[in-house]
Image: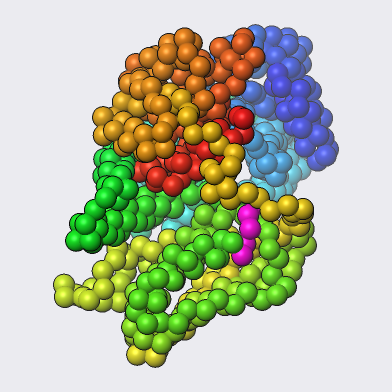
Amino acid sequence: MVVDDNPANLKLLIDILSSEGYKVRPANGGDLALLSVAAKAPDLILLDIKMPDIDGYEVCRRLKKEKHSCEIPIIFISALDDVEAKVKSFDLGGVDYISKPFQPKEVLARVKNYLQIKKLQIQSEKINAMLMAEISERKLVEESLFKEKERLKITLLSVGDGVISTDNKGKIEIVNEVAQALLGWSQDEASGKYFGEVVHLISAITRDRCEDPVEKVIHTGKIIGLANHTILIAKDGTERHIADSAAPIKDENGDITGVILVFRDVTEEIRKQEEVIKSKEETAFANAANTAKSQFLANMSHEIRTPMNGFLGMIQIMEMTELTQEQRGYMNIVRTSSDALLKLINDILDYTKIEIGKMKLEKIVFNFSKMVSDVVSLFKSSAIGKGLIMEVSIQKDVPDHFIGDPFRLRQILSNLMGNAVKFTNKGRIDILIRMVEVRSNNEVKLEFAVKDTGIGIPDDKIDDLFKSFSQVDNSNIRKYGGSGLGLAISKNLVELMAGEIWVDSKKDEGSNFCFTCVLESIHVKQDFPEPSVKKMIEGQVKNELKILLAEDDPVSQMVLEQLSGRKGWQVILCENGTEAFDRYRKENFDIVIMDCQMPVLDGYKATRAIRQLERQRETHTPIIAMTAYALQGDREKCIEAGMDDYLTKPINAHEFYAAVERWTKKKI
């Protein structure tokens, strides 16, 4: 009989058992199962635990109380894969426990074992009945008994699990080969000894000696199960987890003539379960650690970039004032130092994002040659200042527009070119870009090479170049600075772009850093050139703008007011989102600069409130987000809140002007 309230499980079990020729009687609930057993007792019951009317535990408890059903072997089947559920199942009289989802072979093997035991019981009863036959037939009975015992012995010895049979006193008669291998006792060594002398069982949980199952079967006359928290100690002290059951052999009068113990080695199964639990715990711990790292990264980004915004902002404002040549020289030094500090901060944040798996690539259309030109222009003056020749060669068949992440591609190229300029004192730097493969779906594989005539790299240091915090010269007196993160970050970014990075170098002869990446090529039709920011400022943007600035940091307020004042723009200052919304309701503004992190009401909620008001008024004012957070997804979060653009702190004056003028132009 198969009892399960799930139609799919019920059908699957029926199909599995029917395929082997077993007659299967289904029951989709506990009540129906009890009625069916009362009508006709089955040879074996496969019983689900969780059922809506009566659960499997209660069904088992009632069956064991009834004389006609108490001897029926019950195998519990459940998705509850924990020790407590299994212990309770065996305590109620279950002979086995199969965890869902189950395997057909496992179900058939378990059923076969217990039906074999049942068969053996029936055979044994027949043998004993034959012994009580007429005296005239005793010889025939004895011959038949001998044959049956031989058949019984052969059956026990051929079972795939470990099998031990005893007489009604608990003395061992048969130990099959599987049991011999697990116990370390041969048939001759074990034969005639009491079960408890050969087999030692302890609890895996408490390490206490378990009750002798053979004695318990002889005393109770019932089938009992051994849970997989039972440990068998072999003759040499080896411990193995076992699970299965012990059953009585009875004659026609119901008297016990012996006991059969069938057990299976589940040590490997237990080990795998423990590994799964450990893996889940480690994964949960890693996820929690990554979440903590991510939050720490976000907080550090905010806490570092906020003062950097004031620092760099005031430098930019100072550079816009009239300075003496000496003062301008000092300001150049301050700017260079601040740029180096900002690069270090960005490298550390990027490395942390990569480490916790938060680094994601954008997919936007960009002008490839312009991107390369912009990177080269950053280092051109430094190269010329050192007397270096710098040339760029882009293969003619390289498309002019791609879909990809231009910011990260620029970051990789900038790292390599920055290193080339830093470590080259004479000669030249060549940047070579070529297409090495055209793939399906418009994908193109490009190869970049940055070749210099600099100091080169010793052979024993090349393998460490792309490792985090690794530098060729780690001594306290090293000539060249740096965090040692640039190439490690570049390597990770290249791999995110489905490429690889490598270097060929010889000490004192120069280096050739190469990397590949995969981008999607795209044809962009441009009938008219896009107007430059300068032309927009000169011809299309009105100069008298009214700006609503929501910012709670005093230094950032000062920087943005100063920058806006130099353009003649009027700034209305609010220190939190609530003030900004109230002011917006009462006045008209050309543009809103909204800090994301503010007290009382943050920038996201303030923006949503403004957009809701605008839907009623059928208006739209550009809102530019401004935040010290710089993590993947922050831009999307701003756009989702209803903001039109996104600036990260520290604010760059040119980027600030360009963003304001771009959106106010769109408004005109």
Residue 111 image position (x, y, % from top left) = 68, 36
Query: Which is nearer the eye, 49 or 547?
Result: 547
Question: How far from the left and from the top, in percent, is residue 502?
Answer: 49, 76
Residue 100 in the image: above or below residue 434:
above
Is residue 290 placed above or below 190 in the rendered structure?
Answer: above
Question: Is 544 rendered above or below residue 416?
Answer: above
Q: Quadrant of the N terminus?
A: top right
Question: In terms of secondary structure, what is the magenta stretch mainly?
Answer: strand
Q: Is residue 245 left or right of residue 523?
A: left
Residue in front for this viewpoint, 108 or 132: 108
Q: Is residue 392 visible?
A: yes
From the viewer's perspective, tell me whether residue 222 is left or right of residue 575: right
Which quadrant holds the C terminus?
Answer: top right
> Which residue is painted at 26% across and 69% down in the image?
481
Give coordinates of residue 101: x percent, y percent. Answer: 64, 35
**Residue 275 located within the stretch drawn in magenta:** no
Magenta stretch, residue numbers = 365-369
Q: Residue shown at 26%/76% (left/top)?
A: 473
